[in-house]
Amino acid sequence: MSNGTKRIFVALSGLLVTLGAVSLTAAPGAAAATGVPAVADAWEKSPVYVDPAASDQLSGSEADAIAEKIKDADKPVFVAVLPADFPKQDLFQKLRTETGVTGVYGVRLGDAFNARADGAVLSNAAVANLVTTYKDVGDTKTQLNDFVDQAVKDARGSAPASWDDAAGSDGGTPVGALIGVGAVLVAGGGATYAVVRRNRRRKAEEQRIALEKLRVVVDEDITAYGEELDRLDFHPAEAAADDTMRADYERALDSYEKAKSFMAAAERPEQVRAVTQSLEDGRFSLALLAARREGRPLPERRAPCFFDPRHGPSVKDAQWAPQGGAERSVPVCLADATRLADGQEPMARTVTTESGERRPYWEAGPAYGPWAGGYFGGGMLPGLLVGTMLGGMMASPAYGADYGSGYGDFGGGGGYDGGDYSGSDFNPGDFGGGGDFGGGGDFGGGGF
């Protein structure tokens, strides 16, 4: 912190002691352009927004206290207090689209309350239960505090990074951010605030290290796939090529480019799922193309070989048990099926563990969950990995928050995880819970 910043900070701290509290959210007297964009803009900086026209329902200090509670919990929970005449039609869908963050959204609209959430963060049933429990609490402060207390316990994922970014940096720390920090310190919450930020930095560093280790494995996969494309030696203009072959080849090339692009853009381990999913799609396209060129029956769409997805699509299921685990049926390529039938060990994909030794990926660290999830996504993965080290890690409650969900019984819904920015890329049918405010009498009685 620069000397000038320190002087401002000390002065502001003294001022805060004198005045008691300073609001971080929309001040009651502040002029603001109401509407969905205004709410979304405010939510980018803080989890609680109070419309100026509804400032009599929740004071600035009360809103700040709820906002700090959400930030301390590090959960993607958004709260808004809006006037009764705020446009109601498709309100939640518009708020979610404009904000673009996978999370839980609670809105107090006049005297009514409702909430919705992305399935990756909170199930529809959980949201509906929260709304049923708290919608009839008449006092806004009590209602929102009680709702947030339970929502942050239940929600998966982490808070959006923009809430940290809004605090500014040393070279140009905004006065508003300094006031916010001073308010936290004066309220006695400085230690908690520091711990939360330290934990976030630690988690980000752990994920960065995990991604770098995983990048080595994924780059090997991409390279192996590129070599398969070269070995195929297919030319769209060759005499025997037809439109179906060219379409297979084009899909295979598209998968290759997507995999490289997704990996280049990946910032967290869970984003690797998109890479390996693309490679799996591409390998099936190559299998179709090879069968057409050789005049063989087209292969059925099957999962890749469990032991090493680089072996290509599986041809059958075989019985196998990990060391010390129960036997289960796994998809295998022809070579590994033969080895198992002969009583030999399969040709397993090995990776470097934290101890530095090479082990099969199912005996490695948690970052390999997203890697395997792209190849064996959905409900298949839990059955394949049950009883393995990786399977045990993925079954823990904390795994979804750190490495994403969407692995069948191992986690919640797929797609973006809590706190991720997805923009308009979300399924309104999966963004559920308590309905909306417009046109359907969602709240019973007078309804809207």
Image (cartoon, rainbow, N blue to C red):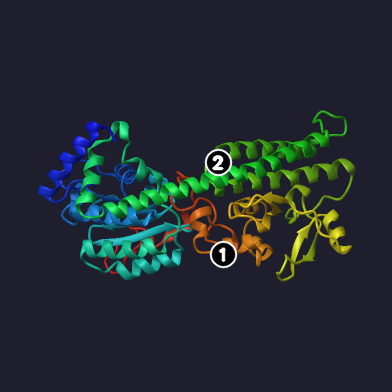
Mark 1 is surrounded, within 10 Å at the Cα level, by few (under 14), some (14 to 19) or many (20 or more) other residues, namely some
Tell me if I can see residue 84 in this picture: no
Kindly identify which residue carries mark 1: 395
Which residue is drawn at the image coordinates 81% and 54% (left, top)?
Answer: 333
| Quadrant for the N terminus in the image | top left
| Quadrant for the C terminus in the image | bottom left
Q: Is residue 48 above or below residue 380?
A: above
Kindly identify which residue carries mark 2: 266
Q: CA distance from mark 2 to mark 1?
A: 24 Å
* Nearest to the observer: residue 19 or residue 430: 19
Which residue is drawn at the image coordinates 55% and 49% (left, top)?
Answer: 270
Which residue is drawn at the image coordinates 81% and 30% (left, top)?
Answer: 235
Give the quarter of the image for residue 306.
bottom right
Residue 381, percent from left and from top: 65, 60
- Dot 1 falls on a residue whose secondary structure is loop
Sequence-wise, which precedes: disc 2 or disc 1?
2
Which residue is drawn at the image coordinates 71% and 39% (left, top)?
Answer: 251
| Residue 435 relative to residue 376: left or right | left
Query: Which label belongs to residue 373?
Result: none
Q: Which amino acid type is shown beneath numbered disc 1?
A: Ala
* Nearest to the observer: residue 274 or residue 353: 353
| Residue 210 relative to residue 48: left or right | right
Q: Is residue 430 above or below residue 231?
A: below
Give the quarter of the image for residue 341.
bottom right
Residue 11, percent from left and from top: 15, 39
Q: Which amino acid type is shown beneath numbered disc 2?
A: Ala
Tell me if I can see residue 143 in this picture: yes
- Dot 2 falls on a residue whose secondary structure is loop
Residue 72, percent from left and from top: 33, 55
